[in-house]
Image (tube, coloured by chain):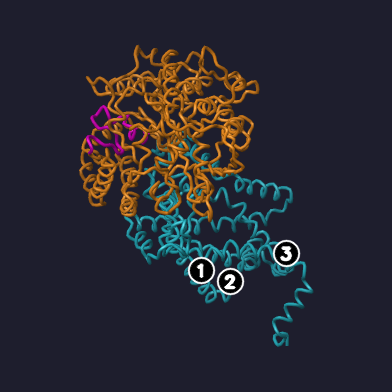
Chain colours: A cyan, B orange
Amino acid sequence: MQSKIPFGRRLIKDIKRFGGAYIMVIPVVVFYILFHYKPLLGAVIAFKNYQPRKGIWGSSWVGFKHFESFFNSYYFGRLIRNTLTISLSGLIFTFPCAIIFALLINEVKSRAFKRTVQTISYMPHFISLVVVCSMITLFVSSDGFIVQIMQFFGSGVNQSLLNMNSAFVPIYVLSDIWQQTGWNCIIYLAALAAIDTELYEAARIDGANRWQQTIHVTLPGIAQTVTLLLILRVGSLMSVGHEKIILLYNDYTMETADVISSYVYRRGLIKGDYSFSAAVGLFNSAINFALVILANRISNKVNGYGIW
Amino acid sequence: MKKWLTVLLALAICLVPMTAFAIDYPVTTDETLTIWKQLDGSIAEGGYTTSNETPGFLAWEEGTGIHVDIQEYNDSTALVLAVNSATELPDMFMMDPANYNGNVMGMVRDEMLTELTVEMLEENAPDYWAYINQPMYMDLIQQLDSKMYYFAGHLFEPESIYRYWKGFFYRGDILEKVGWEKFPETIDEFYQCLVDLKEAGITTPLVFQGTSELKNMLQYGDISSPFGLVCTGEYQADGVWHFGAYEPEYKDVLAFVHKLYEEGLISVDYLSMEGSVAQSMLCTGEAAVFYGNNSRLNTFKSSVEEGGWLYPGAPLKAEGAERALYHFADPMITMGDSTFISADSKNPELCLQFLNFLYTEKGNLVRNFGVEGQSFEFVDGIPRYTDLITHNPEGHALDGMARSWALINWPGIHADVMNAQRHPEETQVIAYELWSDNDHDKYVVTHTTVLDDLIEEYTSLWVDIDLYINECRAKFISGEMDIEGEFDAYIDHLKTMGMDRVVEIKQTTLDAYNAR
């Protein structure tokens, strides 16, 4: 019945009914229009030889020159490989940690202990990345406590782990887990809180123990949230931020540490070649976009639901 | 020493006013000029958050009669972004052109600048023109098209030693204990000294100020020049452009540094060891040789363990050589505070008059010392910072106070007599004298760009080549790449990456530069 009422009338009615909510959403909409949609027009500089004084539309067209320059770069293959390695490692190891941590916290009965653990686990999220990277550098140096522990257990390592190609990705991922798990689990804790307690009661009446309750009630209860976040995460597979990378890498670990964003930072931003940066950004976004669609389609097929 | 400084100051001041035109300051104008620049964070030490309020800048405005609004950006990236995205540029902007795509000529290509003709300078900046119109400055100011586009950043006096502010210094007390009665002068002595220190129980004899400092040490020629290689970066010899890491002598340099690494004379963590850790090692005696900035000779003094003292060492030379081949030095003109008059400025003449003031006798004093009676006084005819600057009652650091009360972070002559007072330790002055004893200016490549039509090709080649050279250097030093077995392959690989074309582009640019 409702669908026969014209959209305009429905909207007016809805605004009258939920006026406060509509007012609250205005800043969000404005934010997205200004900072996420309007700049899309600027992506056109990827196909131009952008000269600031001539502006975006006054600069000359160069077609796919900047894309070709990136694809022909000597290190193109390595950049893609490193980006995907770090990104997928994060997806495989960092992503589930927050879920497991949320499930563990959910099982804790002492309210005080629960709150304390949560607060402590959030803390690293608020530490500046520069400070975190300095801490990592000290911890994994040749006389840092991590290398000393490794030596105690018979490891032959006698130098900073940041000078070892094979250690860069584990350092990156493990420090991410330490810094972000507490923060990332908030959304799962919210989802867990929304699960109807009657379901647990019914499961207990049916004789389910704690583990069975987790498997058959808790996990299905947060499955949609997990799927949603997983699809979004897949949509940023090609995007590994340059900040942490450039704070941790050195000449020796470029082999495994140099990613697309750090390359763009060096070539595009420091040298002021904005068109090149835009071309690489556009290339990344195109792949990320395709991955989101693919992940969503798979989810729809397998689970019967997706983001859309 | 004092006499010598006095002579230099007198020379600097006398050179200034011998001109046909002269500006009658203060000028009469209602106009307000605008300038964009990067914030100098150290003015906070003097209690200021913006240069608009500093006594030095107010004295400049008062001296010229011209009001200027400063818009400051927290870092160079923010400033470059602002310049890049401006629909209308301010009258002036102070920026290192190396941060702009294509350097100065890139800005010319993008029609951002007002060209500064000789006529304009003679008429509106006569004191500046009289000072810079000599080859050592014009070489840097004149661009590849033989034109001038910026008002030079701070420049050193012709024979200034204060350009040479980086080098080795030693824990003199530890060297004495180990039996060294003099500081190493040759590369062999240097190596032996490090070995003796190691044998005496010094954990890591040589440490560096920061993670990229070993690379700098090589690029500035400190280790390479004793091996007959000027430096591992770019240099020119008799009009021929070279890149040290592409020369055969580079192999010997790498072998030497690898030896230091293998024998534990430098830290295995040198690529990730932060400066604060290195500083602590030097001060506690875990290290005894430091490669870093002159200012550290002063700042480390209070942290060094009891009985410890620091002393600078001369740039290293080859056995039998009279002096070092090459050593780090700032160019005669520092580009970071180059001031550009934008194409949008409606009154470039007034901008020049404003800037020119810093080259007048009065302006030179304001620039280097600030306000007479407050931040400086004349003692025996020489301007001297007062205690407000040197021993601030509220404990503010000398540098921050000098930057607030004077204009030493702005264009102008960076007077030796001022520099001498900014470096209170005797060892700091000795360091400058020692470190300036080399042939830097004979080999240095002064221009930082390539010809406009070659920039794109050069950038796309150089980004990858530079990375490859950096990676290989680290691998050769650590031993992951065998110097004897793989050095030739390294050179061949550089050829396949297009290094010969880079050399060709750089040579073409150097030829064009020399032919101006």
Task: Look at the picture and state if B469 lies above or below B302.
Answer: below
Q: Nearer the viewer, residue A150 or B360?
A: B360
Q: What secondary structure is marked by label 3?
A: helix
Q: What secondary structure is marked by label 1?
A: helix
Give the residue pinned by disc 2: A307
Q: Horizontal placement of B126 versus B245: left or right?
A: right
Q: Quadrant of residue A252?
A: top left
Task: Return the disc, 3 or 1, that comes first in the chain's sequence.
Answer: 3
Give the residue pinned by disc 3: A24
Tell me which chain the residue with mark 1 is part of.
A
Give the residue pinned by disc 1: A292
Q: Which mark is residue B393?
A: none
Q: Which residues are magenta?
A: B214-239
Distance between mark 3 and mark 2 Cα atoms: 23 Å
Q: Position of residue B313 (x, y in %)?
A: 37, 20
Task: State how many labels appear.
Answer: 3
- Amino acid on which the number 3 mark rests in the picture: Met
Of the residues tagged 3 and 2, which is closer to the observer? 3
Q: Nearer the viewer, residue A249 or B163?
A: B163
Q: Are marks 2 and 1 in contact (CB under 8 Å)?
A: yes
Q: Position of residue A229 (x, y in %)?
A: 57, 64
Residue at x 35% of width, y 57% of height: A76
- Amino acid on which the number 1 mark rests in the picture: Val
Task: Look at the picture and state if B46 lies above or below A295.
Answer: above
Q: Nearer the viewer, residue A205 or A237?
A: A237
The extreme front residue here reads B20
**Where is the N terminus of chain B found, in terms of image quarters?**
top left
On the same chain, marks 2 and 1? The answer is yes
Q: Is residue B231 within the magenta segment? A: yes
Task: Return the disc, 2 or 1, that comes first in the chain's sequence.
Answer: 1
- Amino acid on which the number 2 mark rests in the picture: Ile
Q: Position of residue A80 (x, y in %)?
A: 39, 58
